[in-house]
Image: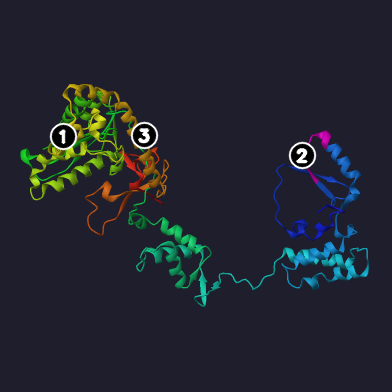
């Protein structure tokens, strides 16, 4: 190996060994040809890439042959080595070899003899032995083919080291064998360790094995932590976005009515509801036309769940005819239509507190609950739905029994003028309500997003579905699994909402929220 005379400190570096050390080197990126610095001496050659042009090759060969005397081919060709540099290198090598002082004794003797250090024949021989020692690590024990290897342990006398094939068998038997109980990754590794077995990376392998266990994945506990940031639905225009849902069944009332169809405007929070005996597409269409379209105009967006009364060709054709964008929520994810779900809770709570034992009278009390809701300031807008809808607060029954200032100061002659003034100011009132609604929802979103643990899916990922959502009839009893599948992600509609397909490629209808999905590993 060639090096310059003034680079004597490289003589003791392992990577500068010659070919006899058999140290693997990286292969050159192009073909090489040899240049003889001394014509006829094939041992003292340098290699040059063939990618050079012929003119550059000739100039390079001429230059190297002109300065061939600056190359040193052995350590003895390098006089003038700094003794301090040499002893420092030897001291550093002492960390990697035993009895370094004995092996380097000729160097120390040569340093003491003369001020100008020169490599003697004895030093050259010691140097070659030193290189050979460093490039050939000693064998601590005699290798035994097919012998059993043991590892010293802190908890047991010895641990038997397993081959990769034996390690796979131990993982499978301890995890899901006769005495297996599908332990977690770390506990599985500790149990195998207590049985007296070991292999490098066993905890990593145990975690990977349990992560891919089919039974462990299907019986994994249900998670309740949010998996996607909260999406804010806001309608800046009154009566442009409505949500609709079915509430029930209730106790049988007059006319065999046991369901309530509810619609709410996302801006004013105005609510329409009607009791029904049956929930069919025609009934939903009739209710929406009579209570929403004929009263407040044609909306732009209608949000519903995936019920058959909404997700059918007749109702979809009805919406298309009015240029209404019909949006469906994800399966078993009512938060997508949260405004309507909150209204449902308000109706239920109001009816419960009014009915007492006369549960069948809920139809008569429904209108009273709706009136109370419409005339109560909403926490999001700070205004009553009645005010945002008509521009004036409604006169409540309590004001009849206990007259307020506006009742006492009522002047019929100026009533119409005052109402017109209220209508002129209604846009300002609605703008204030919109500002408050946006700020409130943003504050709620910030609080909600602190608890989010993102669950990101990509097209082609395998997932499991919640059994209680995909097949509620199968999720019966304490021994049923929590998840079923696997299925494949066919399309990511937005973060947290996906379309699925079977492993054979058959599309699964409806949209699935990430709350009801879990990554599956094979």
Up/down of 376 relative to 191, above or below: above
- Report which residue position mark 1 lands on: 280
Marks 2/3 in contact by CB < 8 Å: the verdict is no
Q: Locate residue 168, reporting x and y percent.
A: 45, 62
Which of the two discs, 3 and 1, labels the residue nearer the N terminus?
Answer: 1
Front residue of 19/277: it is 277
Which of the two discs, 2 and 3, labels the residue nearer the N terminus?
Answer: 2
Magenta-drawn segment: 47-56
Quarter containing the N terminus: bottom right
Horizontal side, residue 80 vs residue 258: left or right: right
| Residue, far bottom | 157
Q: Residues within 10 Å of mark 1 (few under 14, many from 20)?
A: some
Instruction: Identify the secondary structure beneath mark 1.
Output: loop
Q: Is residue 49 magenta?
A: yes
Q: Locate residue 169, reporting x and y percent.
A: 44, 64
Horizontal side, residue 210 vs residue 116: left or right: left
- Report which residue position mark 2 lands on: 50
What whole-number distance in Å separates the C-alpha atoms at marks 3 and 1? 38 Å
Query: Which is in the foreground here, disc 3 or disc 1?
Result: 3
Residue at image location 62% in from the left, 71% down from the top? 143
- Report which residue position mark 3 lands on: 435
Up/down of 303 relative to 103, above or below: above
Query: Which is in the foreground here, disc 2 or disc 3?
Result: 3
What whole-number distance in Å separates the C-alpha atoms at marks 1 and 2? 83 Å
């Amino acid at each position: 190996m060639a090096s310059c005379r003034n680079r004597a400190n490289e003589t003791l570096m392992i990577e500068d060994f010659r070919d006899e050390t058999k140290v693997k080197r990286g292969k050159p990126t192009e073909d090489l040809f040899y240049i003889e610095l001394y014509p006829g001496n094939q041992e003292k050659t340098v290699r040059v890439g063939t990618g050079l042009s012929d003119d550059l090759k000739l100039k390079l060969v001429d230059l190297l042959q002109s300065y061939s005397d600056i190359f040193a081919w052995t350590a003895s060709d390098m006089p003038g080595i700094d003794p301090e540099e040499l002893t420092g290198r030897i001291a550093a090598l002492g960390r990697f070899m035993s009895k370094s002082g004995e092996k380097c004794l000729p160097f120390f003797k040569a340093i003491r003899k003369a001020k100008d250090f020169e490599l003697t024949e004895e030093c050259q021989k010691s140097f070659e032995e030193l290189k050979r020692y460093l490039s050939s690590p000693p064998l601590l024990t005699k290798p035994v083919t097919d012998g059993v290897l043991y590892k010293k342990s802190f908890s047991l006398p010895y641990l038997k080291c397993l081959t990769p094939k034996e390690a796979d068998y131990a993982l499978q038997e301890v995890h899901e064998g006769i005495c297996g109980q599908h332990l977690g990754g770390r506990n599985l590794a500790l149990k195998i360790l207590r049985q007296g077995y070991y292999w490098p990376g066993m905890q990593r392998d145990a975690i990977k094995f349990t992560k891919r266990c089919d039974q462990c994945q299907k019986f994994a506990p249900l998670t309740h932590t949010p998996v996607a940031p909260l999406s804010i639905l806001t309608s800046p225009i009154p009566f442009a976005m409505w949500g609709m849902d079915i509430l029930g069944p209730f106790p049988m009332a007059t006319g065999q009515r046991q369901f309530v169809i509810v619609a709410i405007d996302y801006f004013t929070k105005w609510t329409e509801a009607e009791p029904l005996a049956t929930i069919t597409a025609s009934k939903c269409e009739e209710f929406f036309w009579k209570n929403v379209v004929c009263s407040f105009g044609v909306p732009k967006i209608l949000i519903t769940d995936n019920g058959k009364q909404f997700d059918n060709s007749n109702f979809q054709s009805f919406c298309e005819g009015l240029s209404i964008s019909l949006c469906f929520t994800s399966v078993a994810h009512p938060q997508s239509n949260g405004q309507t779900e909150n209204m449902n809770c308000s109706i239920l709570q109001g009816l419960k507190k009014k009915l007492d034992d006369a549960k069948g009278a809920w139809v008569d009390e429904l209108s009273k609950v709706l009136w109370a809701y419409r005339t109560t300031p909403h926490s999001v807008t700070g205004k009553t739905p009645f005010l945002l809808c008509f521009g004036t607060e409604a006169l409540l029954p309590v004001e009849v029994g206990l007259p307020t200032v506006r009742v006492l100061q009522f002047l019929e002659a100026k009533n119409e003028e005052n109402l017109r003034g209220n209508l002129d100011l209604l846009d300002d009132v609605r703008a204030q309500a919109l500002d408050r609604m946006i700020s409130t929802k943003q504050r709620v979103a910030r609080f909600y997003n602190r608890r989010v643990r993102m669950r990101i899916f990509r097209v082609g990922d395998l997932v499991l579905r919640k059994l209680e959502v995909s097949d509620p009839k199968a999720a019966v009893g304490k021994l049923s699994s929590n998840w079923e599948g696997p299925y494949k992600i066919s399309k990511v509609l937005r973060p947290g909402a996906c379309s699925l397909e079977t492993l054979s490629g058959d599309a699964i209808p409806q949209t699935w929220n990430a709350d009801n999905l879990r990554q599956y590993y094979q």
